[in-house]
Amino acid sequence: MQWAVLLAGGSGTRFWPLSSPRRPKQLLPLAGSRSPIEEAIDRLAGFIPAERILIVTGEQLSGPLRERVDLPAGNFLVEPRAAGTGPALVWATLEAARRDPDAAIISMHADWSVRDATAFVATAATALEVADRHHRLVTVGIVPSRPDTGFGYIVPGGRLDTASCAVERFVEKPDAARALDLMAEGALWNSGLFAWRANDLRREIAAHTPEIAPYLSRLDGGDVQGFFHDVRAVSIDVGLFERSAAVAVVAGDFSWDDIGTWEALARVRSRDRRGNVVHGPVTLVDCSDCIVWNDGPPMVLSGVRDLVVVHANQRTLVLDRARAPDLKATLDALPAEVRELD
Amino acid sequence: MQWAVLLAGGSGTRFWPLSSPRRPKQLLPLAGSRSPIEEAIDRLAGFIPAERILIVTGEQLSGPLRERVDLPAGNFLVEPRAAGTGPALVWATLEAARRDPDAAIISMHADWSVRDATAFVATAATALEVADRHHRLVTVGIVPSRPDTGFGYIVPGGRLDTASCAVERFVEKPDAARALDLMAEGALWNSGLFAWRANDLRREIAAHTPEIAPYLSRLDGGDVQGFFHDVRAVSIDVGLFERSAAVAVVAGDFSWDDIGTWEALARVRSRDRRGNVVHGPVTLVDCSDCIVWNDGPPMVLSGVRDLVVVHANQRTLVLDRARAPDLKATLDALPAEVRELD
């Protein structure tokens, strides 16, 4: 049967000071009225039922997630430590297989913005069919809408069938010129939407991923603590997709964003005619291209441009918008008592 | 005897959202630990005693001023309406003369920053001597430290004695090029520090100021309400100094600022090596030339320059620093419920 795995990890710093350990970005209604994790589950409605949706998360986030997300208690998989997407997805896949030996998995991150759920589900279903038909690990490549330098790219190789290709190569986050070239070449964004049959994943991990392979038996024995204690941290991309020949790519042509930075808000929320995105009580006077989130008392911006301004959780942030993708560097420069939120 | 008149008027908008009707800028410790009005009175210590200091203010500001300033109750002169510096100074001068027929007045604004009280008092004493000796209205012109476009200028004329000159002309706020020319010409800033004998002021007002002259008898009869009801609003500069020949200028060579805008804070408070001025819990990361006042929870600025950022009185303001001198234009663009402070 078909299972979905939602990855809801992360340290909660990308939307500082709005995101916090008690309220991670997966639970913030950044793009609209529902939170990303709620939207992710809604999106699967009619395709994968709640009892076959697993959420992989960390200790800190599991409490707030359980409060807000209506899934069976045993479907929250709480990692003993964060070790990247490799161990997380292997654990979730083997857990699904323990419950359902014939499990096929579609995996995704819990912080995406997807406008067209129907197109999303159709693509996910195709990816699962391709995984089943070819016994390959499938990655969905999103047709790029801009030469974004924040994503990795997938260059498709030879066609496998009408719906899928082999992968010629994966490309790390490119610079702007290279991103344009990649778009022209027909490369796709590496979204992190994957599909595989559980036993195919196990076979490929065993063959290609020494960071994880020796410890699969721990999971077989139900020793999750031991597995996470022993594995080496590795992403599923680096640890498996870039090493295995049994991979395939399916193109996904729907509006997708990972809402990874304040900058992304300008793409997923409506802008005024001067390019400003505003949430909360904010008055703008002659401003352009600003992103403003205010959970506090009235805020006024006048004569400024290209700023991110946030008031939330008893903090105010005024940031050059060009620095939004690297907010972590700013946070690293803060005293702990300023950075840490209640 | 010598009297001091402090003008403490204004609508309290120049330091929005820090200044408010309940806490006008004269009471804000903008330049240091004491408020401008307290510093103004301290500055006169040993020169003019409290019982001969009069404060002219409006209905809204009189309560907060009385709470903070230790003067006899009868020395707060509360204007029935704001009608400019002309009627305010005429009233205060005639009130001093009512109590002391031989009164000589030194008048000033209550929101100045003056670093050297000794030099200030020496100049004020000289101005009073010049007023007494020549029976003229004396204005103190500050020796400019920069070609400021925010002040009017005084071009001195023929010398009257070692301490004073006649006035060749008054110049309205110039543009930057004109301000440089004026400095080169030896022009002085028109500070608003004036000295006169009460009967000299009365004589010149009667001769030159039809906006006020017909109503002097109301004040003689103790009818302050009637006086303010009938006078036309006019500044002492336009209504008298620019019209009278019996004026003189004394040069004041001390550090003086009128702290009229957020911009002025960068002159009167200490700056870090990147030109930032900060008050309150603020962390700056790669910022330059910002003015930040935070009465609230921690604030972080990163990668920005030339901003004024203020959090006070349940409002947050993020302003292009170039707009600080014209903050009123921003405030006029705000909905009343945002602009008005509790």
Image (cartoon, coloured by chain):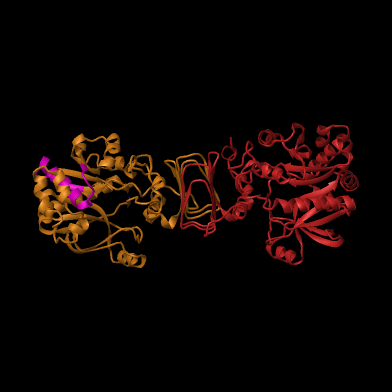
Chain colours: A orange, B red
Name the residue nearer the viewer: A320 or A272: A320
Residue B295 seen in this snapshot: yes
Residue B272 vertical placement versus B218 (above, below): below
Name the residue nearer the viewer: A138 or A46: A138
Q: Is residue B317 magenta?
A: no
Residue B34 point in image, percent of width and height: 63, 43
Quadrant of the image for the C terminus of chain B? top right
Residue A220 point in image, percent of width and height: 9, 45
Residue A292 seen in this snapshot: no
Residue A315 point in image, percent of width and height: 44, 44
Which residue appears at 32% of the width and 51% of the height?
A: A258
Which residue appears at 73% of the width and 60% of the height?
A: B143
Q: Quadrant of residue A139?
A: bottom left
Range shown magenta: A78-106
Q: Is residue A93 magenta?
A: yes
Residue A99 point in image, percent of width and height: 11, 40
Q: Is residue A4 left or right of residue B210?
A: left
Name the residue nearer the viewer: A148 or A315: A315
Quadrant of the image for the N terminus of chain B? top right
Please, which residue is most extreme toward the front here?
B46
